[in-house]
Image (cartoon, helix red, strand yellow):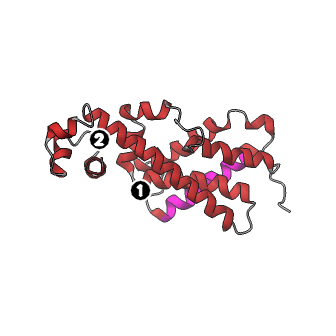
Amino acid sequence: MASAVRLIEAGGPSAFSLREAAREVGVSANAAYRHFDDKSALITAVAADGFARLAERMRRAMASASAHRGGEPASIARFKAAGGAYVGFAVDHPEIFRAMFGECGAECRSATPENEETETSWTLLGQALDALVADGFLRPERRVGAELKVWTVVHGFASLSLDGLTAAPTQRERKAALEALLDFTVVGLCGDLPTAG
């Protein structure tokens, strides 16, 4: 699977074969087929690993934002950190991100975690939104369905960034554009924010 990740990151999901991945790690194609039925099954495994890595990146960013938030309320800092981590993962791993949201990643996106305590990018976003409600920034009636609205904004920005369509070609410009978008999203969700006290 690590070989497939390297090959996908180098050329995209369509640019390698299961046989090539097996050859890279020094095993026969038959040995690879004992673990994966076909190339699609291997890409699905890579996508699942990508979703796990994305969730971990979001979790770490949210924890760090809670500890180092400057003058911003913790729940808002965590919410924005989750969005920033999502886009950061997409930009750092564009081909893995495309595999995650391609045909082979569909199974991973729709699957319910085997362990109810498993944190996914979706559940982490839900936690961030719940914290906005708990802190009085997001009205409970506006919380309903907010995951999809926020995901659409952040995923859209990530996809546009990968396609070079954000009018923010440098890393610094992209970071500034994302920060402005996240501020815009917070105000769109919460309205005028009360002063943290």
Image coordinates for residue 171, horizontal then vertical, percent: 46, 63
Q: How many C-alpha atoms fall within 10 Å of the one at disc 2: few (<14), some, or many (≥20)?
A: many
Q: Is residue 191 visible?
A: no
Q: Name the disc covering residue 189, or none.
A: none
Dot 1 alpha-carbon crowd within 10 angstroms: few under 14, some 14 to 19, many 20 or more: few
Figure label count: 2
Distance between mark 1 and mark 2 Cα atoms = 16 Å
Residues drawn in magenta: 172-188
Specify the quadrant of the image occupied by residue 147.
top right
Residue drawn at 51 percent across, 62 percent down: 173
The residue that mark 2 highlights is 13
Mark 1 or mark 2, which has the lower sequence index? 2
Is residue 183 part of the magenta span, yes or no?
yes
Look at the image and tell me whether residue 31 can be seen.
Answer: yes
Q: Is residue 3 left or right of residue 125?
A: left
Residue extending furthest toward the right:
197
The amino acid type, in three-letter code, at marker 2 is Pro
**Which amino acid, by three-letter code, is at mark 1?**
Asp
Residue beneath disc 1: 92
Give percent across and percent down for residue 87. 50, 52
Q: Is residue 119 left or right of residue 92?
A: right
Foreground residue, 135 or 108?
A: 108
- In this rendered view, identify the residue nearer to me: 14 or 134: 134
Q: Secondary structure at mark 2?
A: loop
Q: Nearer the viewer, residue 177 or 130?
A: 130
Q: Secondary structure at mark 1?
A: helix
User: Which x, y percent locates residue 73?
Assistant: 75, 60
Q: Is residue 32 magenta?
A: no
Left or right: residue 48 versus residue 176 is left
Q: Is residue 32 above or below residue 57?
A: above
The structure residue drawn at horizontal position 26% and vertical position 52%, both measured from the top left corner, is: 10
